[in-house]
Amino acid sequence: MPQVILFDGVCNLCNSFVQFIIKEDRQSVFRFASLQSDYAKKKLDQKSFDTSKVDSVILITEEDQVLIKSDAALAILKQLPRFSWLYFFRFLPLILRDWVYDFTARNRYRWFGKRRECMIPTPELRSLFLD
């Protein structure tokens, strides 16, 4: 089962991150769904995850484990061969990693902008998106 990345579909930074992952994911390890999608809502409800408080990138691993914030971002990068060296930052304290993540997340719309609606994948990429 592929790993699933849930992302903020209206965030330009998040959409750019998804495009980056698609380009670098040569093994097709990942599938994608926006946090606003029915798929994300159902999946997170199954995990008793409060979707109203989630504005983070979320990785659902092959083992059906849910990773959020810096843990999710680093786990994703670890699986992209050219960027796996960034997993080294996993050794920094979680409180520091998540502080940087949260600071960026709080400012992402101001710095990178926001879309009116979720990204619509091209026909070539449609198979990578759930829902």
Image: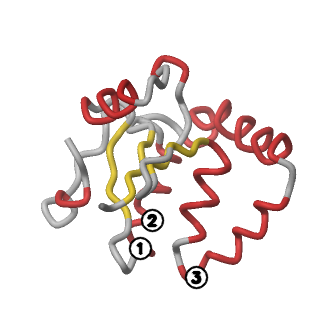
Is residue 116 found left or right of 59 in the rendered image? Answer: left
Looking at the image, which residue is at 48% across and 49% down? 59
Estimate the spatial distance between the alpha carbons at disc 2 and disc 3, rounded to whole Å.
11 Å
Label 3 Cα crowd, 10 Å radius (few <14 / some 14-19 / many 20+): few
- Give amino acid for label 1: Asp
Q: Which residue is mark 1?
A: 25
Q: Which residue is mark 2?
A: 21
Q: Position of residue 19 (x, y in %)?
A: 40, 61
Q: Position of residue 37 (x, y in %)?
A: 28, 32
Identify the mark at residue 82; answer none if there is no mark. 3
Q: Position of residue 70 (x, y in %)?
A: 67, 49
| Label 1: element kind | loop
Vertical placement of residue 48 versus 117, above or below: above
Frontmost residue, 9 versus 29: 29
- Give amino acid for label 2: Ile
Looking at the image, which residue is at 71% across and 35% down? 102
Label 1 Cα crowd, 10 Å radius (few <14 / some 14-19 / many 20+): some
Estimate the spatial distance between the alpha carbons at disc 3 and disc 1, rounded to whole Å.
10 Å
